[in-house]
Amino acid sequence: MFVLYRLMKEMRKPGNGGDKIVIISNYTQTLDLIGRMCRQCSWGFCRLDGSVGMKKRQAMVDEFNDPESGLIAFLLSSKAGGCGINLIGGNRLVLFDPDWNPAVDKQAAARCWRDGQRKRCFTYRFLTSGTVEEKIFQRQLSKEGLQSIVDDKEQVNTLSTKDLRNLFKFRADTPSDTHDKLRCERCRIIRDDGDERGAKVLPKKLKACQELLEQMMLLEDARKFLCPLNPENFGVSVEHYKSKVKQPIDLGAIKKKVSNLIKSRYENVSQFSKDVNRVFANVAKVWTPGQEIADDSRRLQSWWLDKWAELVPVLMTMQPDDDESVSQSEKNNDDPSMLNTRSDDFQEQIGMPEEEDMRNWSHHHSTDTVDDPVFRAAMRGFNSVSFVFGLEVTWSLIQEKEQEQEERKAMEELEVMQELEAKGSEANIDVLELDKSECQADPSNIEESHGKNESDCTVLNATDISSTLECAY
C-alpha cells in the first residue's frame, strides 16, 4: 500500500504529465482500503465492482476517460470489469494482487493499453516477496510456460503435498523468490563483480550518511529522539509502548552504528536509511497527529526525506578512493537533472521476450535503475521494493520479433522441403532397383512398373507442403 501511495503522490506532481491510474484487485476489501487512502489524500476516484449496474458503469468509464474530469484513480474489481471496458483515460495500471488464473490477470492488465491510447503505458504488478502472493504468481507462470525455464519438473496443473507445503512457506531472506528460481547467470556475474567494489566504497558512503545524520541531530525537532524514548514522559505507559514498538531505536544509537563505534555496523546504506525511518515509524505507531512528539517527528521526517533524496544520487555515483577514473556523472552531482537519473547496476532486457520468459526481462536490484522515471522518483530514498522485473514493449521491438518469427518459419519450411525431397530421392532409388529386378525376371512388366514409379514420385509437391505447414502452424 505504501508503494502505491508513493507512486500516486509522485505522478500527480507538476511536470509529471498529469497521469491517471487504474488499480485492479480481486478483493473488495482491498478496494475499500485503497478508496479510504484516496479520500484521505483528496484524490478523486471512482469504483467499479459487481454491485454497479450497466448504465452506471459506462458513465464511470466515460467520466474517467474525459481528460477534463477530476478523477485520477479508477478502482476496478477484476471479476466485474477485468474485460470488456476501455480505460484509455489512464496510462498507469496496478495489479494489486494476483489471480490463480493467468488469463484473468492478462485481461485485466490490458484495460489501458488499447486503441485510442495517446500516452506511454506502465503496468505494475505488486507482489510481497517470499509470500503466498509470489507463489500464486509463479503458478501462473508455470501454466504459461515457465516449466521450460525454471528447473522444476513437477506437474504444473496439480498441487502435490510438497507444493501445498511450499505454498505457505515464507522466505524472508530473499529479495525475490521468483528471481532465485530462475537462477539468473547475468545477475550473478554482476553481483560478484560488484561485491569487491561495493566494499571499497562503503566507508565513503557511510561517512556521508553520518554527516547528514549529525546535521539532523542539531535540529530543534530532533531533541526528543537523540536517546531512547521514555514513553511516560509523553503520556504513554511503558507496557503500551512495548506492545506497539517491537524494534525501538534512536538517533544516538544510529550514530554509534554508522560511525563504527560498536561492532554492529551497517553493511550498506539501505540499512542506515531503514533505521532512520524506523525512528519515525515507531512514533507514528504510538502517538497521533496533534500531539507534540508526533508533530516533531513529522516535521523532522519531512526534513529527512528531502535531504536523503538529495544525497541518494551522490551515493550512487561515489567511487572508491583508489579509483583513478572519475565518471562524468560524479562531476554533475550538483545538477538538478541528476536527481532522477538511472544507475548502471542492472540487466537490460534481451530482445522482445514472451511474458512468461522472465529470464530475458530486465532485472533491477534497486528501483534506482527502472525505466519509469516517475516510479524511480517515487521510491527514491525508500527500500520498500527489493526487486523489479521489467518488460518494455515498443513498436520497433514488435516488428523485430515478427521478422525473426517469419525468418524462423521460412527456415523450418525449407528444412521440411529438403527432408521430403531427400526421402523422395531414396524412394526413387528403391523403386528403380525394384523395376530393374522385375525386368530381369519378366520384361513385360517394364511399362507397368515405370507408371507406378511416376505416381510415387509426386507424393507431395511444393504446393502441398506449403498448405500443410500453414495448417500446422
Image: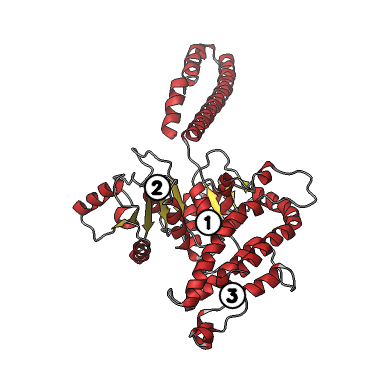
Q: How many marks?
A: 3
Give the residue at mark 2.
Answer: 19
Neighbour tally class for label 1: few under 14, some 14-19, many 20 plus, Cα within 10 Å = many
Q: Nearer the viewer, residue 312 or 386?
A: 312
Give the residue at mark 1.
Answer: 379
Kind of residue at disc 3: Arg
Give the residue at mark 3.
Answer: 223
Residue 126 in the image: state x and y as whole percent: 47, 57
Does residue 293 lie above or below 214 as drawn?
below
Kind of residue at disc 2: Asp
Q: Nearer the viewer, residue 222 or 184?
A: 222
Residue 412 in the image: state x and y as whole percent: 53, 30
Give the spatial CA distance, label 2 vs label 3: 40 Å
Residue 158 in the image: state x and y as whole percent: 46, 60
Coloration of the structure image: secondary structure
Kind of residue at disc 1: Met
Verify CB contact (< 8 Å) between mark 2 and mark 3. no
